[in-house]
Image (cartoon, rainbow, N blue to C red):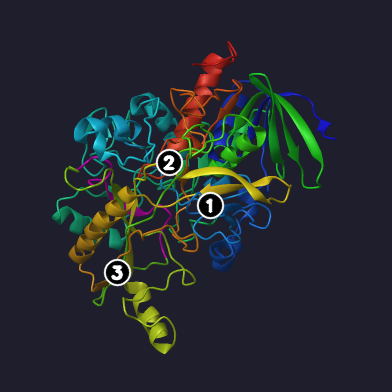
Amino acid sequence: MATRLKPVDVVTVGVGWAGSILGKELAQAGLKVVGLERGDNRTQADFALPQTHDQYKYDRQLELFEQTSRSTLTFRNDYREVARPMRRHGPFPWGQGVGGAGFHWAGWTWRHHPWDFKTKKMTTERYGANAIPADATIQDWPMTYEELEPSYDKFEYTCGISGTAGNIQGTIRPGGNPFEGARTRDFPNPPLTRSYVETLFTKAATDLGYHPFPVPAAQMSRPYTNPDGITMGACLYCGYCMNYPCEVAAKATPQTAVLPAAFKTGNYELRSHAAVQRINVSGNRATSVTYVDAHGREFEQPADIILLTAFTWSNTHLLLLSGLGKPYDPATGTGVVGKNYAWHAGLPYVPMQFDKEVITNPFMGAGALCTSIADLQGDNFDHAGLGFVGGAIIQILAMGWGPLTFQPTPPGTPTWGSAWKKSVAYYYNRSAQIVGLHDHLSYRGNYLSLDPTYRDYWGNPLLRLTYDFGPNERKLSQYLTGIGEKVARAMGASHYGSYGLGEHFDAGVPYGIIHQVGGAMTGSDPTKSVVNRYLQSWDAHNVFVVGASAFPQISSFNPTGTVGALAYWTAGAIKDRYLRKPGPLV
């Protein structure tokens, strides 16, 4: 029997970027907010030198990620196959604990391009309906870039993003991304100091006719105080960033940029080790959530507003477990919960080595210390006759690489023994990597559902992922791999390899990208989406599902910037409209 607790105004399920922003915004509005987090309570003060530079602990053992012995998912490539549990993270490491993946993220903070919100409409208008694969289920967003722009701006100023704007109110500015949507103003901080390999990439890309610019970074290029009065330090370029906490609070995380302001209100309470099992629904509204604490005790927390703000999989899993929304059926094409899953392939991948004295110092860097080109992103180039739609951002990385995970050797080098050791010792400091992140359409056969056989630590059915590459992505990857090779040659690389997508997705390969979207997508039609344009459930008006689960497909840009914008967008809708008149906003 669950212990029924005192009702509160708001419950957030998950305390990552979306949960912390919504919690803070609503607590500042005077509401009593409880943040429920399944994992540990991690504070910035818990991590200090030398433990934060333990590469084995954080990069190899993935200390800050979900324990697959407690919760995982099952996987198959096709719905006709039997799914099996993922006992290791493989290509799908996902965060747990306060801050979620936002605590150990790399810090790339992109906005979607205006085209990303109208992909289907604009592709059809330019190339015809046949340009989109017949089994693709892509949908346009119900809101536009222009509507979300103020929310993007709020997130960037909350996080102190370092970068160079390429388009301020329609004026294209040198040094930034000339293809981006118009911004209200410049980034709050100037870009990070460029690395040597970035200068080589910049020259090569410019010579090839592209327009390189620094990736917007959540590492502070200088000490910064955000609009909530929270101060963060300047980046030290220590090289311990992605998969790590920051020992000097120079990387924006929920702990360093948001939660202190929430706690300051006196209206916000955080409960860690609170694993939500279901949402309890009566009629067209939710009444409470049921969760289990670290001691196995079950509690019911009533709330007027329930916000699902966890990772993509967790949001979808909880909707399915709660019977909230109709599950998607790929055989009939009906239902919505679990539909339009898409993954961010980190390809093409072009590692390169230099025989001449090009010293790259890969042990230094920052998670988002990268230089990119967007000339080939989305529809920024003519696709006529190419056989695919979409594109990629392509960048050189200077993220910081320790020897346990970075052992570069030229193609043809033995994979073990003295020759391998000699090659690693020589090329470690003469290597660099070009990586592309490309668009991925949603397909009828890629979806999330409940597994009929396997269960998690709490006895619930595991989430089942059915996924494989589509023909559009394979053609796109092949095309982009050629572009990466061309840039590597222009940089003067003595050796380089190139890797694109294979025939099928292999769950045993560590692709290295955790960006997952879909399953609870936003839309204008309740028969084709889970939430409306304000991320409000069509089935229970006091439930909002906020996160990358709302994306109808994945853009080539990392999702975090858009997740942050959606959190501010939904917070504004709740404060300005829902609280005055609770009910459907659309």
> Considering only vertical position in the picture, is 571 above or below 467?
above
Which stretch appears magenta? 364-381
Q: Which residue is drawn at 37% across and 54% down?
A: 369
Label disc, if present, on residue 497 of the rendered structure: 3
Q: What residue type is labelled 3?
A: Gly
Number of other residues with Cα within 10 Å of mark 2, as a class: few under 14, some 14 to 19, many 20 or more:
many
Mark 1 or 3, which is nearer the eye? 3
**Mark 2 vs mark 3, CA separation in Å:** 33 Å
Label disc, if present, on residue 444 of the rendered structure: 2
Magenta span contains residue 289: no
Asked whether, in this view, residue 102 is left or right of residue 488, the answer is: right
Q: Which of marks 2 and 3 is nearer the N terminus?
A: 2
Q: Earlier in the sequence, mark 1 or mark 3?
A: 1
Residue at the spot of label 1: 104
> Helix, strand, or loop for circle 2?
loop
Asked whether, in this view, residue 179 is left or right of residue 138, the answer is: left
Q: Is residue 160 visible?
A: no
Q: What residue type is labelled 2?
A: Arg
Q: Which residue is drawn at 22% across and 59% down?
A: 482
On the image, the x and y values in percent for residue 172 come to: 21, 35
On the image, the x and y values in percent for residue 200 come to: 23, 61
